[in-house]
Amino acid sequence: GAGVSQSPRYKVAKRGQDVALRCDPISGHVSLFWYQQALGQGPEFLTYFQNEAQLDKSGLPSDRFFAERPEGSVSTLKIQRTQQEDSAVYLCASSLPKGTLNTEAFFGQGTRLTVV
Amino acid sequence: EDQVTQSPEALRLQEGESSSLNCSYTVSGLRGLFWYRQDPGKGPEFLFTLYSAGEEKEKERLKATLTKKESFLHITAPKPEDSATYLCAVLYDYKLSFGAGTTVTVRA
């Protein structure tokens, strides 16, 4: 597709349930990012992949959060034993590095996770 | 720690009433400052990248400028369709650090 695609768009999970959020980046984009956006706030960095390598996972809030990108394209963000504080919009972005810089990151529509 | 602060939090404008949004940042070695527009229920949409003090970029009714400590997004003669949240972000290493955004509402 032409843009970054995320699924599902909305997810309601019961507390303690595991969830998996999917991201299809723009074809050919090497870099992939996951961000978490709370209501009324800007996106907060979670993790970064370059191809299939996860180079930075410093923003993941706890060991319940896990991300993978096994073939360097589609990525999945998994949250185990969801808690109410995990409720947020999860955004995926991809970009094409230009030398040591990243060009502008293109964002998907996000997945709104509500934990009840 | 690098920080990005946007002001005001919210801005209500009459159609045609020009105004400016502010983004101040503290970062050592700015590698790029980005402006995004975000509509409700959607992901951020890229607007501009600025790399050095004195740089300016324009797109329709929007103009972004950059100094050593802050960036401004000027909205000239806004229309209702310019209503959105405008996010500023600084690039350090490979990741973006965002401000909380300014929500702009333009009334007809």
Image (spheres, coloured by chain):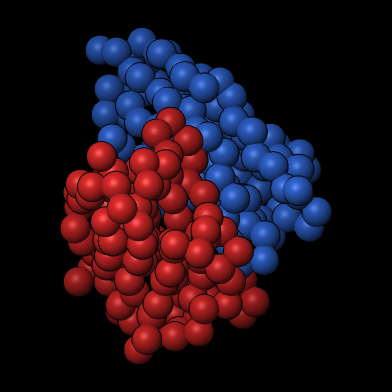
Chain colours: A red, B blue
Q: Residue B60: which quarter of the image? A: top left
Tell me if I can see residue A28 in this picture.
no
Q: Position of residue B100 (x, y in %)?
A: 53, 34
| Residue drawn at (23%, 47%) of the image | A14
Query: A66 or A39, which is in the foreground?
Result: A66
Q: Residue B93: which quarter of the image? A: bottom right
- Above or below, B73 against A102 in this view is above
| Residue drawn at (42%, 42%) of the image | A85
Q: Position of residue A86 (x, y in %)?
A: 39, 47
- Above or below, A37 against A76 in this view is above
Count how many numbered circles sit on residues in the image.
0
| Residue drawn at (37%, 86%) of the image | A70
Please state, as top left, top right, bottom left or bottom right, where the C terminus of chain A lies in the image. Answer: top left
- Above or below, A43 against A93 in this view is above
Query: B7 or A53, which is in the foreground?
Result: A53
Q: Residue furthest bottom?
A: A71
Q: Position of residue A19 (x, y in %)?
A: 27, 61
